[in-house]
Image (cartoon, rainbow, N blue to C red):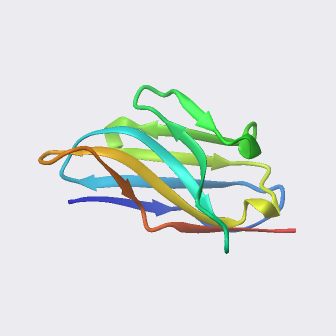
């Protein structure tokens, strides 16, 4: 089995920073793309940022210049550095990984989510 576990969420004042981490574990052969998505109450889950195995990144327009995604392939971990946070960034943040397990086929895996609350 493969598990993704997020950490680093919390409450922060507008203008502040948080760093999210997501560690993948289990019977992993390799991980392709990894990413962060967020879901606010009553809204759909949307892309925040993704990163390929070799470090190519994509960001939602709403977070460009404020958030930075990175990964450590040796640790099967992806990070999201969030700076200049705004109240509209408040959401549950979910980690995603496209994982090839040691047996089976490539599949999408999700973490359980971590809450980020930004207050003004």
Residue 12 is situated, as x and y percent measured from the top left of the image, at 74, 66
**Res. 91 image quadrant:** bottom right
Between residue 103 and residue 70, name the one nearer to us. 103
From the viewer's perspective, is 84 left or right of 4?
right
How many numbered discs? 0
Residue 119 is situated, as x and y percent measured from the top left of the image, at 81, 70
Q: Residue at x 72, y 65 (%)?
A: 90
Q: Residue at x 72, y 54 (%)?
A: 17
The quarter of the image holding the C terminus is bottom right
Q: Residue at x 19, y 45 (%)?
A: 105
Between residue 43 and residue 50, name the one nearer to us. 43
From the viewer's perspective, is 7 left or right of 68?
left
Identify whether 92 is placed above or below 30.
below
Q: Residue at x 25, y 44 (%)?
A: 106
Residue 65 is situated, as x and y percent measured from the top left of the image, at 75, 37
The quarter of the image holding the N terminus is bottom left
Extreme-right residue of the structure = 120
**Res. 52 image quadrant:** top left
Between residue 65 and residue 97, name the one nearer to us. 97
Extreme-bottom residue of the structure = 41
Residue 55 is situated, as x and y percent measured from the top left of the image, at 48, 28
Identify whether 118 is placed above or below 67.
below
Identify whether 7 is placed above or below 17.
below
Extreme-left residue of the structure = 103
């Amino acid at each position: 089995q493969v598990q993704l576990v997020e950490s680093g969420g919390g409450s922060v004042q507008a203008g502040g920073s948080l760093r999210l981490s997501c560690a993948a574990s289990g019977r992993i052969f390799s991980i392709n793309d990894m990413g962060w998505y967020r879901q606010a109450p009553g809204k759909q889950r949307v892309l925040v940022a993704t990163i390929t195995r070799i470090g190519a990144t994509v960001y939602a327009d709403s977070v460009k210049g404020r958030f930075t995604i990175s990964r450590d392939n040796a640790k099967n971990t992806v990070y999201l550095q969030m700076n200049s946070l705004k109240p509209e960034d408040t959401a549950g943040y979910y980690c995603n990984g496209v994982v090839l397990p040691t047996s089976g086929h490539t599949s999408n895996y999700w973490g359980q989510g971590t809450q980020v609350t930004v207050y003004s």
